């Protein structure tokens, strides 16, 4: 199942993949519906910019860094639990 905004390119793609992929669109003029995904994009972009700066890397190095960054992004705390630990996406 794919979730997306109502961009024309997503609508065309959804019509091309009709029957193979279930596509759900966020309501028009309601950008707050996709806020959680936009927040994750921002967190990931900031992590990449902080880590890479202006380095020139090979494809394997970039894949390794993105894999490691995904581990750190998914370890961020979402909410504290009663026992003093934190709930994370991981």
Image (spheres, rainbow, N blue to C red):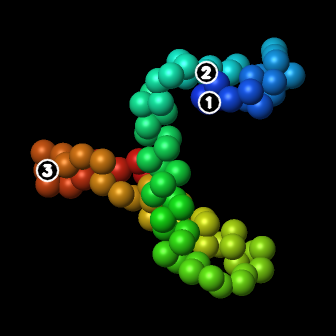
Taking the spot 42% from the left edge, 31% from the top edge, the residue there is 32
Residue 72 position in % (x across, y down): 45, 64
Q: Secondary structure beneath disc 1?
A: strand
Q: Nearer the viewer, mark 2 or mark 3?
A: 2
Residue 2 position in % (x across, y down): 65, 28
Q: Secondary structure beneath disc 3?
A: loop
- Quick check: marks 2 and 1 in contact, CB under 8 Å? yes
Of labels 1 and 3, earlier in sequence is: 1
Which circle marks residue 25 in the picture?
A: 2
Q: Quadrant of the N terminus?
A: top right
Of labels 2 and 3, earlier in sequence is: 2
Residue sitting at the far bottom: 55
For mark 1, what is the residue?
A: 4
Tell me if residue 66 comes above or below residue 52 in the rendering: above
* The quadrant where residue 3 appears: top right
For mark 3, what is the residue?
A: 83
Q: Nearer the viewer, residue 89 or 2?
A: 2
Tell me if residue 69 comes above or below residue 11 in the rendering: below
Q: CA distance from mark 1 to mark 3?
A: 37 Å
Q: CA distance from mark 2 to mark 3?
A: 38 Å
């Amino acid at each position: 199942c794919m979730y997306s905004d109502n961009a024309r390119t997503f609508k065309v793609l959804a019509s091309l993949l009709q029957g193979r992929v279930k596509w759900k669109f966020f309501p028009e003029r309601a950008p707050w519906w996709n806020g959680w995904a936009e927040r994750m994009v921002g967190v990931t972009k900031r992590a990449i910019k902080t880590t890479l700066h202006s380095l020139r890397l090979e494809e394997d190095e970039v894949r390794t860094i993105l894999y490691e960054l995904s581990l750190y992004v998914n370890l961020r705390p979402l909410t504290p639990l009663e026992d003093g630990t934190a709930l994370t996406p991981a």
